[in-house]
Image (cartoon, helix red, strand yellow):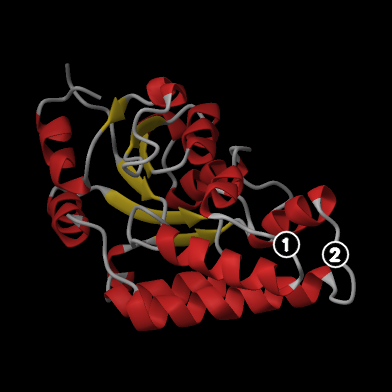
Amino acid sequence: MQSTIKAVIYDMDGVLINSEPLWREAEILTFNKVGLNFTEEMCRETMGMRLYEVVDYWYNKTPWEGVSLKEVEKELLKTVTSLIVENGKAMEGVVESLEYFQSKGYKLALASSSAMKLIITVLNKLKVASYFEVINSAENLPFGKPHPEIFIKTAQELDIHPINCLVIEDSFNGVLAAKSALMKVVAIPDEESRDDHRFIIADKKLNSLLEIENVILESTI
Protein backbone atom coordinates (compact mmCIF):
# COMPACT_ATOMS: atom_id res chain seq x y z
CA MET A 1 0.00 0.00 0.00
CA GLN A 2 1.41 3.40 -1.01
CA SER A 3 1.52 5.84 1.89
CA THR A 4 -0.26 9.15 1.25
CA ILE A 5 1.31 10.94 4.20
CA LYS A 6 2.78 14.33 3.27
CA ALA A 7 3.06 15.98 6.69
CA VAL A 8 3.77 14.87 10.24
CA ILE A 9 2.31 16.77 13.19
CA TYR A 10 3.88 16.21 16.59
CA ASP A 11 2.24 16.74 19.95
CA MET A 12 4.73 18.11 22.48
CA ASP A 13 4.22 16.90 26.07
CA GLY A 14 5.00 13.20 26.26
CA VAL A 15 6.02 13.04 22.58
CA LEU A 16 8.91 15.48 22.17
CA ILE A 17 9.73 15.93 25.83
CA ASN A 18 9.29 13.70 28.85
CA SER A 19 7.28 16.40 30.59
CA GLU A 20 4.28 14.46 31.88
CA PRO A 21 6.08 13.57 35.17
CA LEU A 22 7.06 17.24 35.49
CA TRP A 23 3.48 18.33 34.84
CA ARG A 24 2.30 15.96 37.55
CA GLU A 25 4.88 17.34 39.98
CA ALA A 26 3.88 20.92 39.13
CA GLU A 27 0.16 20.17 39.49
CA ILE A 28 0.64 18.47 42.85
CA LEU A 29 2.73 21.38 44.15
CA THR A 30 0.35 24.03 42.81
CA PHE A 31 -2.98 22.49 43.76
CA ASN A 32 -1.81 21.42 47.19
CA LYS A 33 -0.99 25.09 47.86
CA VAL A 34 -4.70 25.93 47.47
CA GLY A 35 -5.78 23.11 49.77
CA LEU A 36 -6.42 20.19 47.46
CA ASN A 37 -5.10 16.78 48.44
CA PHE A 38 -3.72 16.25 44.95
CA THR A 39 -2.35 12.92 43.66
CA GLU A 40 -0.61 11.62 40.54
CA GLU A 41 -3.71 9.65 39.60
CA MET A 42 -5.77 12.83 39.61
CA CYS A 43 -3.35 14.37 37.09
CA ARG A 44 -4.32 11.76 34.51
CA GLU A 45 -7.89 13.06 34.42
CA THR A 46 -6.76 16.21 32.63
CA MET A 47 -4.03 14.92 30.29
CA GLY A 48 -4.18 16.78 26.97
CA MET A 49 -6.21 19.69 28.34
CA ARG A 50 -5.15 23.33 28.13
CA LEU A 51 -3.77 25.06 31.20
CA TYR A 52 -6.89 27.04 32.07
CA GLU A 53 -9.06 23.98 31.42
CA VAL A 54 -7.04 22.00 33.97
CA VAL A 55 -7.48 24.74 36.58
CA ASP A 56 -11.19 25.16 35.78
CA TYR A 57 -11.73 21.40 35.95
CA TRP A 58 -10.35 21.10 39.47
CA TYR A 59 -11.96 24.30 40.72
CA ASN A 60 -15.36 23.03 39.57
CA LYS A 61 -14.79 19.70 41.32
CA THR A 62 -13.23 21.08 44.50
CA PRO A 63 -13.54 24.88 44.79
CA TRP A 64 -10.93 26.77 46.78
CA GLU A 65 -10.89 30.24 48.30
CA GLY A 66 -8.43 33.11 48.51
CA VAL A 67 -6.62 32.60 45.20
CA SER A 68 -8.07 33.39 41.77
CA LEU A 69 -8.09 30.86 38.94
CA LYS A 70 -5.83 33.16 36.92
CA GLU A 71 -3.28 33.25 39.75
CA VAL A 72 -3.32 29.45 39.96
CA GLU A 73 -2.80 29.25 36.18
CA LYS A 74 0.21 31.56 36.41
CA GLU A 75 1.68 29.58 39.32
CA LEU A 76 1.21 26.27 37.51
CA LEU A 77 2.81 27.58 34.31
CA LYS A 78 5.71 29.11 36.25
CA THR A 79 6.31 25.88 38.16
CA VAL A 80 6.21 23.52 35.18
CA THR A 81 8.37 25.88 33.09
CA SER A 82 10.99 25.95 35.83
CA LEU A 83 10.94 22.16 36.16
CA ILE A 84 11.34 21.71 32.39
CA VAL A 85 14.26 24.15 32.21
CA GLU A 86 15.97 22.30 35.07
CA ASN A 87 15.05 18.68 34.35
CA GLY A 88 13.41 18.38 30.93
CA LYS A 89 14.70 15.61 28.67
CA ALA A 90 13.81 14.61 25.13
CA MET A 91 11.77 11.48 24.62
CA GLU A 92 13.60 8.54 23.08
CA GLY A 93 13.95 8.86 19.31
CA VAL A 94 12.94 12.52 18.93
CA VAL A 95 15.91 13.75 16.91
CA GLU A 96 16.13 10.51 14.93
CA SER A 97 12.48 10.75 13.86
CA LEU A 98 12.74 14.45 12.98
CA GLU A 99 15.87 13.81 10.92
CA TYR A 100 14.20 10.91 9.15
CA PHE A 101 11.02 12.78 8.23
CA GLN A 102 12.98 15.85 7.14
CA SER A 103 15.28 13.76 4.94
CA LYS A 104 12.24 12.22 3.22
CA GLY A 105 10.67 15.59 2.47
CA TYR A 106 7.74 15.49 4.88
CA LYS A 107 6.47 18.81 6.18
CA LEU A 108 6.75 18.97 9.97
CA ALA A 109 4.58 20.79 12.49
CA LEU A 110 3.97 20.98 16.21
CA ALA A 111 0.44 21.21 17.65
CA SER A 112 0.23 21.37 21.43
CA SER A 113 -2.32 22.17 24.12
CA SER A 114 0.43 23.88 26.10
CA ALA A 115 0.89 27.65 26.27
CA MET A 116 3.12 29.12 23.56
CA LYS A 117 5.52 30.37 26.23
CA LEU A 118 6.05 26.78 27.37
CA ILE A 119 6.33 25.50 23.79
CA ILE A 120 9.15 27.96 23.11
CA THR A 121 10.86 26.92 26.35
CA VAL A 122 10.73 23.25 25.32
CA LEU A 123 11.91 23.85 21.75
CA ASN A 124 14.84 25.92 23.02
CA LYS A 125 15.66 23.30 25.65
CA LEU A 126 15.71 20.50 23.07
CA LYS A 127 17.16 22.64 20.24
CA VAL A 128 14.63 21.32 17.70
CA ALA A 129 12.68 24.46 16.69
CA SER A 130 14.29 24.60 13.24
CA TYR A 131 12.67 21.32 12.18
CA PHE A 132 9.12 22.69 12.34
CA GLU A 133 7.49 24.67 9.55
CA VAL A 134 4.41 25.39 11.68
CA ILE A 135 4.17 25.66 15.49
CA ASN A 136 0.71 25.98 17.03
CA SER A 137 -0.68 26.25 20.55
CA ALA A 138 -4.33 25.62 21.38
CA GLU A 139 -3.95 28.20 24.17
CA ASN A 140 -6.08 30.89 22.52
CA LEU A 141 -8.25 28.78 20.23
CA PRO A 142 -12.00 28.51 20.91
CA PHE A 143 -11.64 24.76 21.44
CA GLY A 144 -8.88 22.51 22.78
CA LYS A 145 -8.28 18.79 22.37
CA PRO A 146 -10.23 16.50 21.98
CA HIS A 147 -11.78 19.01 19.56
CA PRO A 148 -9.92 18.77 16.22
CA GLU A 149 -9.53 22.54 15.72
CA ILE A 150 -5.79 22.75 16.40
CA PHE A 151 -5.03 19.96 13.93
CA ILE A 152 -7.29 21.40 11.24
CA LYS A 153 -5.66 24.82 11.68
CA THR A 154 -2.19 23.28 11.49
CA ALA A 155 -3.03 21.39 8.28
CA GLN A 156 -4.34 24.60 6.72
CA GLU A 157 -1.12 26.43 7.59
CA LEU A 158 0.92 23.57 6.13
CA ASP A 159 -1.29 23.67 3.01
CA ILE A 160 -1.80 19.92 3.33
CA HIS A 161 -5.18 18.17 3.35
CA PRO A 162 -5.97 16.55 6.74
CA ILE A 163 -6.18 13.07 5.21
CA ASN A 164 -2.53 13.45 4.18
CA CYS A 165 -1.38 14.27 7.72
CA LEU A 166 0.04 11.90 10.32
CA VAL A 167 -0.25 12.93 13.97
CA ILE A 168 1.96 11.59 16.77
CA GLU A 169 0.22 11.72 20.15
CA ASP A 170 0.56 10.29 23.64
CA SER A 171 -2.84 11.15 25.16
CA PHE A 172 -6.27 9.79 24.33
CA ASN A 173 -7.65 13.33 24.03
CA GLY A 174 -5.00 14.06 21.41
CA VAL A 175 -5.65 10.84 19.50
CA LEU A 176 -9.38 11.57 19.49
CA ALA A 177 -8.78 15.11 18.23
CA ALA A 178 -6.58 13.89 15.38
CA LYS A 179 -9.02 11.17 14.33
CA SER A 180 -11.83 13.73 14.41
CA ALA A 181 -9.75 15.82 12.00
CA LEU A 182 -9.65 12.79 9.64
CA MET A 183 -5.92 12.35 10.14
CA LYS A 184 -3.85 9.22 10.63
CA VAL A 185 -2.60 8.83 14.19
CA VAL A 186 0.28 7.03 15.84
CA ALA A 187 -0.22 6.75 19.60
CA ILE A 188 2.79 6.48 21.91
CA PRO A 189 1.16 6.32 25.35
CA ASP A 190 3.26 6.24 28.48
CA GLU A 191 3.80 2.92 30.22
CA GLU A 192 0.95 3.41 32.67
CA SER A 193 -1.54 4.21 29.89
CA ARG A 194 -0.35 1.64 27.35
CA ASP A 195 -3.08 -0.88 28.15
CA ASP A 196 -5.88 1.70 27.92
CA HIS A 197 -8.30 0.04 25.48
CA ARG A 198 -9.40 3.42 24.09
CA PHE A 199 -6.15 3.70 22.13
CA ILE A 200 -7.59 1.11 19.75
CA ILE A 201 -8.86 4.04 17.66
CA ALA A 202 -5.26 4.98 16.77
CA ASP A 203 -3.92 3.65 13.47
CA LYS A 204 -0.81 2.38 15.24
CA LYS A 205 0.34 2.14 18.85
CA LEU A 206 4.10 2.21 19.43
CA ASN A 207 6.44 2.06 22.39
CA SER A 208 8.67 4.93 21.23
CA LEU A 209 9.51 7.20 18.31
CA LEU A 210 12.37 4.85 17.43
CA GLU A 211 9.77 2.50 15.91
CA ILE A 212 8.08 5.03 13.65
CA GLU A 213 10.48 4.79 10.72
CA ASN A 214 9.50 1.14 10.22
CA VAL A 215 5.81 2.09 10.20
CA ILE A 216 6.44 4.50 7.33
CA LEU A 217 8.80 2.18 5.45
CA GLU A 218 6.31 -0.67 5.65
CA SER A 219 3.52 1.68 4.49
CA THR A 220 1.30 0.23 7.21
CA ILE A 221 -0.41 3.49 7.95
Q: In this rendering, does residue 115 appear at all?
A: no
Tell me if label 1 and label 2 are in contact, CB under 8 Å: yes
The N terminus - image quarter? top left
Chain-order first, disc 1 or disc 2: 1
Looking at this rendering, what residue extends furthest in the front direction? Answer: 37
Looking at this rendering, what residue extends furthest in the top direction? Answer: 1
Please name whichever residue, 109 or 28, is drawn nearer the observer in this view of the structure: 28
Please name whichever residue, 197 or 94, is drawn nearer the observer in this view of the structure: 197
Quadrant hosting residue 12: bottom left
Residue 7 x %, y %: 32, 44
**Which kind of residue does numbered mark 1 sit on?**
Leu
Looking at this rendering, what residue extends furthest in the right direction? Answer: 65
Query: Which residue is label 2 attached to?
Result: 64
- Name the residue rendered at 13%, 57% in the picture: 96
Q: Is residue 182 left or right of residue 89?
A: right
Mark 2 lies on a secondary structure that is loop
Q: Is residue 130 left or right of residue 45?
A: left
Query: Which residue is label 1 attached to?
Result: 36
- Name the residue rendered at 27%, 76% in the picture: 127
Mark 1 lies on a secondary structure that is loop
